[in-house]
Image (spheres, rainbow, N blue to C red):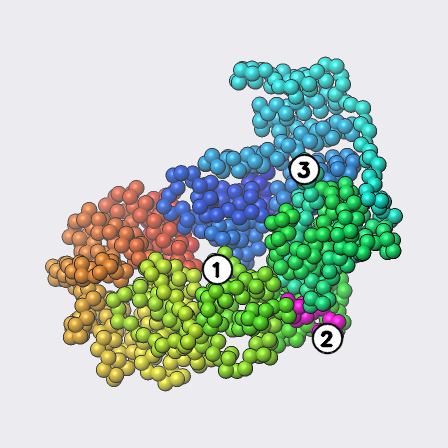
Amino acid sequence: MSPAVGRARDGEAGPLRLQIMGPLRVWRGATELDAGPRQQRCLLALLLARVGHPISTTDLIALIWGPDSPASAVNVIHKYVGALRRLLEPNLPPRASGSYLLRSGNGYRFTAGPEMLDLVAFRWHVASAKASVGKERLDEALDHYTEALQLCRGFAGDSLADSNRAAATFAGIVGEFFDAVVDAARIAVQVRQPSRVLAPLRLAAEMDALHELVHASLVTTLAAAGQQAEALAVYRRIRERLVGDLGIDPGHALQDAHRQVLTQTALPQAEPVDSVGPAVRSDGVPVVPLVRPAQLPPDLSQFVGRSTELALLGDLVAGIRDDGRTSPLVVAMDGMGGVGKSTLAARFARLVADEFTDGQLYLDLQGEQDDDETVRAGDALHSVLYALGVPASQVPDTFDARVGTYRSLTAGKRVLLLVDNVQDPAQVRPLLPNSAESLVLVTSRRPLLGLAALDGAYLLRLDVPDLQSARELLVHRLTRWTKRRIGQADAVIVDEIIELCGRLPLALAILAARLTARPTLSLESVLADLRDGAHRLEAFPHGAGAHDPRTAFSWSYRQLSPGAARLFRLLAVALSPGITARACVSLSGQDSATTHAELEELTEAALVTEHDDGRFTSHVLVKAYAQECLHDVEPPEERRAAVSRLLQYYLHSSFNAQVLLVPHRVPIEPSPALPGVVPEEPATYEEALAWFAGQREVLKEAVRLAETLGYGIVPWQLAITMQQYLQWAGYFQDWEDVMRSALHAAQESGDEVGEAHTLRSLAGARWSFGANQDALDLLAAALRIFEQRAMPLEQAMAHANLQWVYEALGRHEQALVHGEKALARYREIGYRRPVTLSLLSMGRSLARLGRLEESAHMLERALELHEQIRSELKAGWDATLTAVEGETRMAIASNLEQTGRVREAVEQLELSADTSRRVRHRANEFEALHRLAELLMSVGDIAEAVEAFTRAGLVLDSFPDGGPERLRDRFAQLAQKMPAGQQGNGSLRA
């Protein structure tokens, strides 16, 4: 069955379909979707044009904007990607990448099958057509070509390209269409069905009025269809254009086509099929086998999905007759146990078997077994020689003689060889046929790098299928085998079962078989078994001879070195967002070189996966197997020590990074780490920010884990190190969640000091959400503890926080009282740096009370002290001081505005936004730009106001989930004030 772009009846939701071979269009079922503004449509079109291949963010910027890209280009792309994901998958959870628009390195990759995207379907039909030509099935080839050509409706990208690179990308698709229509025309004339390709030929001629080969094909085809007058007219028009526009005469192709029309020889006699020469004899062994082997394993009747992989394999085989090929096409698939490598290889081998007329061979080398059970290359050669017709008694005894005989037998032949479960390249290299017309499909758990480097193999990494394909796999088997009806309520259960199985095909197949064997077993019972993480693998029947996930993983585990096996067990305690190699060093307690070598071994064995950002993760079922091994092998004290080392790595690394963010804050230093812990030591502010950004999710989980376990680290100490980053980056919900976990742990352990620190920090998170009364209650509780414990610095900080909350409530007299208390305590203990923040806060409160002269004096003192402290710093720059400077300038701008000095206020707000941007303080940068837009609007400077509004929208869009509700509401209100037609220039997620 050939793939086709899916269709749906009116009124049904239907499948998602996209068109790029013409104007960009998107449908869900019968409903056409709006793909968004022009640049967003351009981004989608570029990703579709390079379907299956990643495009870096840098390349996307160059493709969309060319050399004149705006500074906000990266943010704009991220915004468009989010919008496209929601368009394509409306029910996609927040921050999920979905099934189609995937993150790939520092860019994105669009994945789609032929049933979804016209370009993939077009390429599949063209490849199938070429394969049919190779088998002399010209009618079949023409059928494929006509199916492919019907998918083109005009220029790809439809004038969306604003850069030369984008234009070239879309032109490449047009070129594919032109090549296909020319090839199709040649075959249509040969099989005497020229009228079938006239419509696409005319379209191609319209698209490029000077393409000589297209016009030559149109002339020839029109003549073959009996339309000589139109053929001559087409020739006359292009000749006039070539002479008039380019000053050249028609080329040989056009001249030949014209001559055929004049001599009425456009419809040729049927050409004889090329015959294959007689077989060649070599070293006394008959080249022609006594039998034509057909050893491929049976196809799986329940096979579903893998359309992308099948299309890729089809493209590779379609090019097997390239003139430059001198060796067989070798495709080596690798992936974890149970991912479906053998099933995919068998399915594809069955699809293309007819093209390999000299036979199909199959070998299972059992590379996943122990060394003494693995099939040796010499034994494998004996098997294939026998299959090719060499009597067992005549199979040579020596290895070299077997290789020579095999090469003689396969010379010039079209043989398909499927080699399953290969352990290393040395096993398969002697089995490669001596023919460029042959295909070798190899499966292995490890990437066969040597086969790629020395034998030109194409390496194909097979990952677990997407959710839709996994769902299709499980539901298809359930409905076919058990006649179960999967209703709407069951669909949710099925999806959770699939995710708890990590979408592993082997696991899903076993569960389907289990449900078949026990018709009364409910989906809810299976789900309950899978939810028990400690015993998840018990959900899969196992025993003697069983091929369940545990058995599949054990084959890989048994082949590990002792050190790698130990690290695999310890990785069971790694946190789910993933673990870096540096964190693994502390987890294992070994040196860096040893740990890196063991990680590489685990990666090659497909027991862990290395991601582009340097994280290592394990499949959910592999991790469950690692947990079983950990509890079976490692004593409790070693398990506890490993967890403690890992948590202490995160605590001390986070502490080191925090010190760089706020280098002059009095730190809360953790206890010394255990031996073997090697924390990160960022060298710069940027490195510290990058470390927090990359480890944010795992740090959150580390706090929760420490709270649950009650050992390893003090949870609140890790939480406090994260506060500055979470606050400035706008992760307010993360900030609150982390502090609540830490607060619970501190209260449970009776740690009043930790309780007070987390109460104060939690108050800041609540204040960020506008929950000011909650913040007051939390700060009052924290202040009581600080006063009871005689902690003046912490008291000062609590008073400073209280001033901010009272200011937000509009109670400026009380705010000023707390500001004065904070300032007094800072001065009592000689801590100068926070004085700048106190002066700022007091200046702001004085302004709210109408005491503008006092406010201006206070704010000027804050700036002077800021400059004095900064000049004393060895580094010359401090992030916290710079952030305070930005807030101070906002306050100064407010005073200037009230006194009518608008232009000076604008300058201060621009400086404020710039300083906040430098330290990545999103909330302050948004506030400054928001105020700037309002101020400019108030004085009628519309163009500058719109520009500030747009910048504020981009900052808001960079927040997690579009920013807190209070900021989104304020921005939406500002948008209403913008002139008509300008509201869309900013983010309007509110």
The residue to which callout 2 is attached is 543
Front position in the image: 972 or 709: 709
Front position in the image: 760 or 984: 760
266 inside magenta stretch: no
Helix, strand or loop at label 1? It is loop
Q: Amino acid at mark 3?
A: Asp
- Chain-order first, disc 1 or disc 3: 3
Circle 1: is it few (<14), some (14-19), or many (20+) Cα within 10 Å? Answer: some
Q: Which mark is residue 322?
A: 3
Q: Amino acid at mark 1?
A: Gly
Quadrant of residue 122 within the rendered picture: top right
Circle 3: is it few (<14), some (14-19), or many (20+) Cα within 10 Å? Answer: few
Residue 500 in view: no
- Location of residue 764 in the rendering, given as x and y in whole percent from the top left corner: 32, 69
Quadrant of residue 807 within the rendered picture: bottom left
Helix, strand or loop at label 3? It is loop
- Chain-order first, disc 2 or disc 1: 2
Locate the C terminus and report the quarter of the image it occupies: bottom left
Front position in the image: 77 or 53: 53
The residue to which callout 1 is attached is 614
Total marks placed: 3
In the image, is 192 to the left or to the right of 828?
A: right
Residue 265 in view: yes
The residue lying at 32 percent from left, 45 percent from top is 947
The span shown in magenta is: 541-556
In the image, is 272 to the left or to the right of 536?
A: right
Q: Amino acid at mark 2?
A: Gly
The residue lying at 62 percent from left, 19 percent from top is 251
